[in-house]
Image: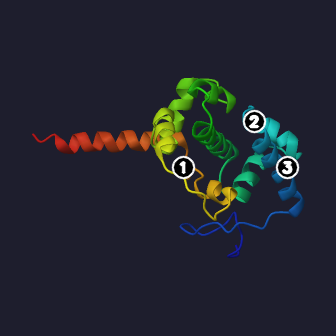
């Protein structure tokens, strides 16, 4: 066992990732670009693997290694970004925005949007519309990247942690 062996790293030590093949990275970027262009469509792993020309398991593992998050979480981030832009810049109804950004259910859209941003789509729209915007020297693409939702954990895991925290808070308040 060597120190750089990614599979046999000592217990408690992080695995050292091997550099990825440039051809594989190009294929992964192709799939990522398709998700960016058509984020309103369904992108199961099978479809993404087909676009990139690799197996499903290899695609999922390689995508996460290359971009720091699983494909589903990346797609979720892009959908939330697009929804935020539509809420801020258009007068479309929240329902129309939900369906236009790829959500099949208004309830799922609202719950996920709230989990990621901390506020409902309507509250986000009201706050953004009330904010005074001055043209700045920072290009819009940099602002978009800076304001991108930070999904370091899955939304379902975040929801579970919030529920556990609120339960722990109520139990701490109950004194016998």
Q: Is residue 61 found left or right of 163 in the rendered image? A: right
Q: Which residue, given by chain and number where applicable, does mark 3 sit on?
A: 30
* Earlier-in-chain disc, 2 versus 1: 2
Q: Nearer the viewer, residue 60 or 138?
A: 138
Q: Is residue 17 found left or right of 21 in the rendered image? A: left
Q: Nearer the viewer, residue 108 or 158?
A: 108
How far is disc 2 from disc 1 in space, using C-alphas? Answer: 20 Å
Pinpoint residue 85: horizontal percent, then vertical percent: 62, 42
Pinpoint residue 4: horizontal percent, then vertical percent: 71, 74
How far is disc 2 from disc 3 in space, using C-alphas? Answer: 13 Å
Q: Residues within 10 Å of mark 3 (few under 14, many from 20)?
A: some
Residue at image position (80%, 63%) is 20
Which element is circle 3 on?
helix
Q: Which residue, given by chain and number where applicable, does mark 2 sit on?
A: 43
Pinpoint residue 52: horizontal percent, then vertical percent: 86, 46
Pinpoint residue 35: horizontal percent, then vertical percent: 77, 42
């Amino acid at each position: 066992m060597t120190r750089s062996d990614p599979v046999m790293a000592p217990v408690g030590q992080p695995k050292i990732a091997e550099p990825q093949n440039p051809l594989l990275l190009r294929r992964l970027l192709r799939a990522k670009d398709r998700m960016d262009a058509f984020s309103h469509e369904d992108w199961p792993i099978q479809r993404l693997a087909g676009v990139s020309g690799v197996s499903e398991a290899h695609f999922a593992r390689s995508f996460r290694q290359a971009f720091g998050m699983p494909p589903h979480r990346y797609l979720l981030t892009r959908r939330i970004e697009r929804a935020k832009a539509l809420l801020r810049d258009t007068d479309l109804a929240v329902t129309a925005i939900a369906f236009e950004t790829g959500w099949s259910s208004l309830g799922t859209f609202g719950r996920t949007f709230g989990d990621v941003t901390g506020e409902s789509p309507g509250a986000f729209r009201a706050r953004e519309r009330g904010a005074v915007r001055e043209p700045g020297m920072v290009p819009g693409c940099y602002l978009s990247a800076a304001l991108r939702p930070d999904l370091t954990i899955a939304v379902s895991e975040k929801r579970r942690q919030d529920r556990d925290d609120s339960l722990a808070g109520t139990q701490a308040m109950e004194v016998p």
